Amino acid sequence: MKPSLGLLLALALVACQPTLPVPQVRASAKPQAAASATPGVPAADTHPPSLLARPVGDVQVLAGQLQVDATYVAANAGGRIISNDGASIISTNGSGIISNDGASIISTNGSGIISTNGSGAVGPGDVLFAKGGRVYAGGGNVVAEGPLAVRGQSGLGIISTNGSGIISTNGSGIISTNGSGYRLAAAPAPAPGRMLPAAGMRVGVMDLDTQALVPLGQDAAGRPVTAIYTDLAGRYQLYLPAGRKHNVVVVANVPDTRDLRQLYAGVSAAGATALDVDEDSSRATELLRATLVGRLYQIVSARTAEAAIAGISPSALPAGGSAIIATLQTFWRQAQAAGITADRPVCERQDFAQRSADRLLAHVDLASLISSQAYDKDFADPPEPAIKAITEVFGMMRAAGALLLAADPHHFEAGAYLEVTVPHDPVRRPTDVATFAEQAYLYETHVGTYPQMLNLISDLARYDADGQIFHNEPQRVARRLEAAGFSILFQLILSWASEIADNSFELPKPACQ
């Protein structure tokens, strides 16, 4: 039985922490099916995430923006849709995050206001809190009193009458004295499936080699920071150790959620300085990781080398297919020698497969993963980056899925598009249509076939009346998605062949609870 998408993703995200993917530890939040802490990995940071981290030593900046399905988050995480000078955003912590310029003043707990003061660091003197109609500095001094009282204070740089932002003490928003009339106001609910920048999201970085969270610097007290919050525009800036030579995964979540639909991830190539994460890139990242995990799980669950490659059709293999077969069977023998056999607990085999796949992904050249006819003989389009292709197709499915679900919310409950009726994640929101396609057609244990995937996309295209989403080419879109899945799987295995052949690939030690 193949591991579920949710478990595969959660295994990696919680392996180093007893909570969902990045920041604050809650001892009771550890899913029982997930792996325990990785041996040798330090305990996760127990301090709350920081608004910003101070860089320590030589660093490499990785910056980007996070966007989420605002309707779903608002309905399921207490998020609030607010307007930033006319542009809608979503506050994910339910407290009404505010800012005077999209970055420098953010309330992360419903009462405290933290200012970066232009210095890129958070210090005790920058923290303000409201109580009894007054605004206090971190040291307890009153800096503003009354509903709109303003008192300038040298050095604070947040409350001033010289043209900088003024904060209302009643939490209603922000009033500016410079004539801009800046304020945050309630905004209309967006259309289902529409992505908006997400403020107040927790963001961290996972090392694919170790599945540990990467240190992002220190807070004002000198404590290590492994997670930060996105600002009002959904932006984040991460300070990674300089000289990074392998790929990492940026992971994010709505604070304190256990809903796997509110986990987000994006894989960042070694040396990259920018990465945006959203619903579509998160699904593509899941597929990038899960397509190999599914195959490796099947291999270590086999009792013979021949059974390890069961289901692989020689006619479907690309040039170099014999190397693919040899690599998979050699991996099975090495796993057997390491004690990872079909008799081991399911969660141990799953964890071993996930860690092996992530270790491989840490070192592969992501730009080299290309969809082409060399890996799928039925693919007729010019070669294209495979991860980009998957991301774009998932975006099309999300957009059309919103239209289909609006017309028929129970469309997927009847088991349509499946070769056999099997459990799958319920389709509750537009992005889930892409998740359904992953589980049904793109994992190594298929429960559907290409014609059924084509039926799904063709039905989605019926709701794309003007052809703006699929451009009236559902068959081309379906083939593009399948070709990307095959191309990624085959290229990952081929890139692994020499390490497996000379026994230089370090097998991970699985953890299981």
Image: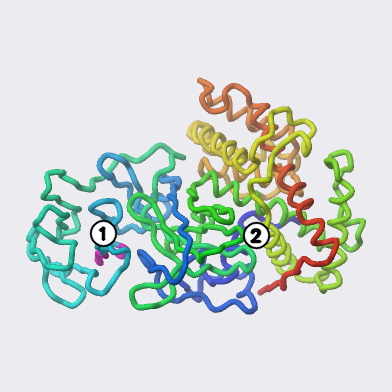
Secondary-structure class at tag 1: strand
Left or right: 331 with respect to 42? Answer: right
Q: CA–CA distance between discs 2 and 1?
A: 36 Å
Rendered image quadrant of residue 314: top right
The residue shown at (72%, 70%) is: 508
Q: Which residue is mark 1?
A: 105
Q: Quadrant of the N terminus?
A: bottom right
Residue 336, position in %: x, y?
85, 69
Identity of the amino acid at label 1? Ile
- Residue nearest the viewer, comparing 159 with 48: 159
Left or right: 123 with respect to 15? Answer: left
Identity of the amino acid at label 2? Ala
The crowd level at tag 2 (other Cα within 10 Å; few <14, some 14-19, many 20+) is many
Label of residue 362 in the image? 2
Give the residues drawn in magenta, as a range.
108-114
Residue 271, position in %: x, y?
55, 56
